[in-house]
């Protein structure tokens, strides 16, 4: 069986209303509140230039559960940052459209303001928060105290995002572009630093401090720790210390 979205039979009356150039914002929004509205009516409304002058109508169109992807995604690309986030978080939006909208948000990260970055870090979909973990804002291609402080704030806000998942955190810390600030923030985070899989991932990075590496390594069985360190980017000095600690703590 296919996975086509169910739509109601096309109504000639609804098509006529959707195409009416005199359609007001209130009537258009009332029409879009109908969850059973067919894709054909939505497409007709999307061609109504007068109705599309309304920001609220454009958002409602892109967020409708029966809006075809070729209607909702191009519309979403025209939205401001927070309108995009609203669509990406709407429970009525199909999952494939949410993914596409999140991709638009991720592509814009280099151009959003500092305030927008922090809001996205706290509230955006998990994939956007994860992208912010790696999207370091650098001033003039060089880090300074201000940019480092902002990076830390964005990372901490992203890690506190309720939509961020363990898998996304692991992928972020193991990414070649993961910064020392990210690894340190995850290693200190009250929630994420306690997860066994995340501790194992942190031990594979090249930025984990000796103190954290020893703390996490003590809770991992010796054989497994050796396997982790075999693919780890940690400095050889830290790896050696970890292995010595393991041998010392192992029973005779």
Image (cartoon, grey):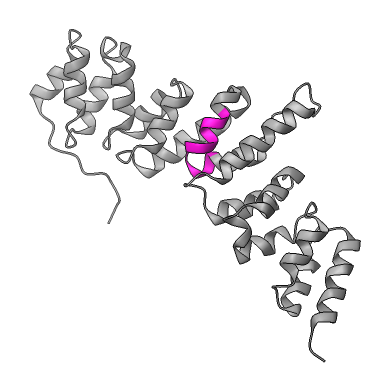
- Between 203 and 150, the residue placed more toward the observer is 150
| Residue 200 x %, y % | 68, 64
- Between 213 and 197, the residue placed more toward the observer is 213
| Residue 100 x %, y % | 46, 36
At x 91% / y 62%, what residue is drawn?
Answer: 237
Residue 32 quadrant:
top left
Say if residue 176 shows up in the picture. yes
In the displayed structure, does residue 11 sit left or right of residue 61? left
208 drawn magenta? no
- Between 20 and 58, the residue placed more toward the observer is 58
In the displayed structure, does residue 20 sit left or right of residue 75? left
Tell me where the magenta segment starts and ends, as one range: 117-128
| Residue 184 x %, y % | 72, 49
In the image, residue 97 above or below residue 229: above
List the single residue furthest toward the right: 237
In the displayed structure, does residue 208 sit left or right of residue 45? right
Say if residue 179 shows up in the picture. no
| Residue 62 x %, y % | 33, 28
Residue 234 quadrant:
bottom right
| Magenta-drawn stretch, dominant element (helix, strand or loop) | helix
At x 36% / y 29%, what residue is drawn?
Answer: 72
In the image, residue 5 above or below residue 196: above
At x 19% / y 39%, what residue is drawn?
Answer: 7
Quarter placement of the N terminus: bottom left
Number of dots carrying numbers: 0
Quarter placement of the C terminus: bottom right
At x 61% / y 42%, what residue is drawn?
Answer: 156
118 drawn magenta? yes
């Amino acid at each position: 069986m296919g996975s086509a979205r169910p739509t109601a039979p096309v109504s000639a009356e609804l098509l006529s209303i959707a195409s009416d150039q005199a359609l007001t914002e209130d009537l258009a929004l009332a029409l879009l509140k109908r969850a059973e509205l067919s894709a054909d009516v939505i497409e007709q409304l999307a061609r109504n230039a007068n109705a599309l002058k309304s920001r609220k109508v454009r958002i409602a169109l892109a967020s409708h559960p029966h809006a075809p992807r070729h209607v909702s995604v191009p519309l979403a690309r025209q939205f401001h940052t927070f309108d995009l986030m609203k669509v990406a978080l709407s429970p009525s939006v199909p999952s494939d459209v949410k993914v596409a909208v999140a991709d638009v948000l991720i592509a814009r990260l280099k151009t959003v303001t500092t305030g927008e970055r922090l809001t996205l870090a706290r509230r955006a979909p998990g994939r956007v928060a994860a992208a912010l973990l790696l999207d370091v804002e650098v001033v003039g291609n060089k880090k300074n105290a201000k940019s480092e402080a902002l990076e830390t704030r964005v990372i901490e806000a992203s890690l506190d995002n309720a939509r961020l998942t363990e898998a996304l955190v692991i992928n972020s810390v193991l990414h070649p572009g993961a910064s020392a600030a990210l690894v340190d923030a995850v290693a200190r985070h009250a929630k994420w630093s306690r997860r066994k899989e995340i501790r194992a991932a942190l031990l594979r990075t090249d930025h984990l401090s000796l103190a954290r590496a020893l703390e996490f390594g003590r809770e991992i069985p010796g054989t497994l720790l050796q396997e982790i360190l075999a693919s780890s980017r940690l400095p050889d000095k830290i790896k050696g210390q970890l292995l010595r600690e393991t041998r010392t703590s192992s029973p005779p």
